[in-house]
Amino acid sequence: MIWESAVRIERLDVEALRLVEWHEPRSRALAEEVIGLSDSGLETMVVVRLSGWGVPLRQQVRLAGRRVDIVIGSHLVVQIDGYAHHSSSAQRGSDVAHDAELRLRGYTVLRLSYAQIVHGWEAVERTLQAAIARGLHLPPRQRR
């Protein structure tokens, strides 16, 4: 998570990270996995946890004029609401308006908080599995 955030926020060069002669095999392997798309450690946690599910994931996709954190499949949007970027009334209002626009375009939007991701992952996992089982990650015309 730290490297992912450093690449995105601090503009650490991914190739420079990979050129370091890491002494631990796990460090080398982690350096190879960094892609630099996460806006936060929370986002990285979610992506890492979902990466083995066999469902396409994309990060920082522009939809309806704004970037969203994660898109599962083509139509399930997962927004990570850490306190730093989602604590003001103005930001909340902007988020709600964008969610409404996405819904009108056929997307399902799920917002996850810090507490849910860090302390309640099992419930988050069940919710995401249920959404995928219902086909909410697919375009509306392809849903079961």
Image: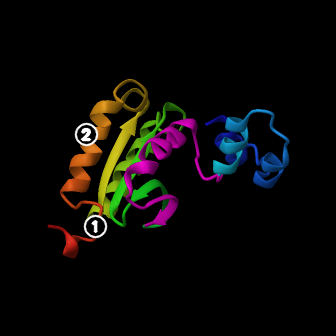
The image quadrant of residue 104 is bottom left
Task: Report the Cα–Cα distance between label 1 and label 2.
Answer: 18 Å
Residue 3 image offset from top left, x and y in percent? 69, 40
Q: Most extreme residue toward the top, as rendered?
A: 119
Using the image as rendered, state which of residue 82 and residue 37 is in the foreground: 37
Q: Is residue 90 visible?
A: no
Query: Which residue is at a point 58% across and 46% down the rendered structure image?
Result: 39
Q: Which residues are magenta?
A: 35-63
Front residue (pair 25, 103): 25
Per the image, the residue denoted by label 2 is 126
Residue 66: x and y, percent?
Answer: 49, 61
**Residue under circle 1?**
138
> Answer yes or no: do the residues labelled 1 and 2 have beta carbons within 8 Å?
no
Q: Secondary structure at mark 1?
A: loop
Give the mark, 1 or 2, whose residue is nearer the N terminus. 2
- Give the amino acid at mark 1: Leu
Q: Badge 2 local density, few (<14 within 10 Å), some, or many (20+)?
A: few
Q: For the point 81% across and 33% down, which residue is it?
A: 23
Q: Secondary structure at mark 2?
A: helix
Marker disc for residue 110: none
Please say if 93 is above or below 56.
above
Q: How is the image coloured?
A: rainbow
Q: Is residue 28 left or right of residue 84?
A: right
